[in-house]
Amino acid sequence: MMDLLIPDKTHDESRQGEALMLKAETAKNNGRKLYIESYGCAMNFSDSEIVASILAESGFETTADYSVADVIFINTCSIRENAEQRVRNRLKEFTVAKVKNPGLVVGVLGCMAERLKSKFLEEEKLVDVVVGPDAYRDLPNLINQVDDGQKAVNVLLSREETYADISPVRLNSNGINAFVSIMRGCDNMCSFCVVPFTRGRERSRDPLSIVAECRDLFDRGYREVTLLGQNVDSYKWTSLQPSPKERALEGQIEAGVENDKSLRLGEVGGVNFANLLEMVALIDPDLRVRFSTSHPKDITDEVLYAINKYDNICNYIHLPVQSGNSRILDLMNRTYDREWYINRIDAIRRIIPDCAISTDVITGFCSETDEEHKDTVSMMDYVKYDFAYMFKYSERPGTLAAKRYADDIPEEVKQKRLTEIVAKQQEYSFYRMQARIGRVERVLIEGFSKKSDKDYCGRSDQNAMVIFPVGENYKPGQYVNVLIERSTTATLIGKVIPQTP
């Protein structure tokens, strides 16, 4: 059987280092070419869309060939050591281009830039610009500084910046799926994580601008949006009084939502995440809504009931557990224990019986014993996750764990534990896929299978990749009903059946 293992798009390894390519706008072209590639999570790819929009306004044309670029940017991830090493290795590959073109501007954006700040310029002599996630509006000015012979750094974090007024270009050229950022930053201080230090304090984006962006995407043919935040469940907007820019956005959508109760939900007490989900779902039943990532301490029954209420809010929740042991969770500063997490799993199963659940797991955290590791294994047995992202603990400089705890688990023990949970997850992923055989899944066609142009691929409501033969009566961007006939550990395989009236 052909290999049909296709990574989940929340952190698609096949997209790491992907170059952004846009259609050139002749009227604004300044003759300079921009090459930008992204690493890490969906939020980084979304941020690259914002960067491209800002620089397109300044006349830059994108290129997929860095050797002909005038400006090269790498949007970086700092969550794990190997992610940073990948970026450093990539920078070395740009040295030849810099030698051939001494005027080439090389910049590092995002979380790694924020963590290392001006130190990056000392460590990587090739780099001219270092820019944190909240300073992308300053990029045209920073490039001008480099053109004048200076190095440039802006890593100031903001308590207000959400880029709500910027209409992002879309990295995903299929015109079907789009990421929509609903908030920035993070107030959770998980002891293993650098995000609060690299992305700043949590702030939510105005719901009017989110609805406007999602409505515009739908009108342009997109059929799925993924609402992004470091912790979407803590989304909170306390005012619907629009600023002048927001009034302009409101005017753009007024005709379509004047009588739409979705924009009235938050007038008393603000808009929470459950309200926002409903607002986006009400745009159109054919607009599929996903979100990432949830936090176990914040996901409420109200959110679960909102998912259950609307057919176009997907029955899929990514709920990172990190560890199944309460003592380790406390050391991680996750602010919930094993019992709380199980309570949230039970609530999902009760309110959304057909909901798929994925997770993140870290093995070998500081002082973790064999018995505590077994608690993580037993949690996997309890939940039987559909998917999981699994990692060995990697100490990150500047985090609370690095300051407080010794990274005292031997590498071979970490690897052994990781191997065990990976095998466990493969077992349950196959179990979950097998349970779908014989069922009919509603699938949004995304394009051709990576393995064959005779097969289409798309995702089910539960976020499983589905492969099925190409047909004359349907095409990418449309929904089809697929009868599942067989599966791998990560892919459902079937055939399209006629839709009932």
Image (cartoon, helix red, strand yellow):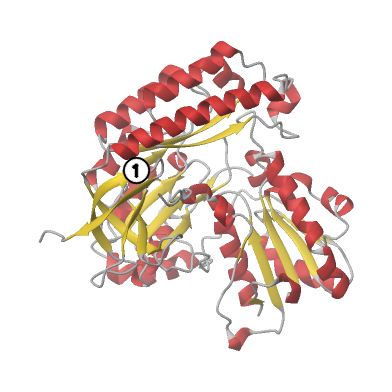
Residue depicted at 68% across the width and 32% down the height: 394
Corner quadrant of residue 105: bottom right
Residue 24: in sight, yes or no?
A: yes
- Quadrant assignment for the C terminus: bottom left
Please say if 118 is above or below 98: above
Please say if 81 is above or below 27: above
User: Which of these two is toward me, 456 or 168?
Assistant: 456
Q: Residue furthest left?
A: 501
Q: Position of residue 216 (x, y in %)?
A: 39, 69
Amino acid type for the residue under numbered disc 1: Ala
Please say if 233 is above or below 68: above
Question: How many numbered markers are drawn?
Answer: 1
Q: Position of residue 381 (x, y in %)?
A: 40, 22
User: Which of these two is toward me, 455 or 152?
Assistant: 455
Left or right: 154 with respect to 46? right
The residue labelled by disc 1 is 274
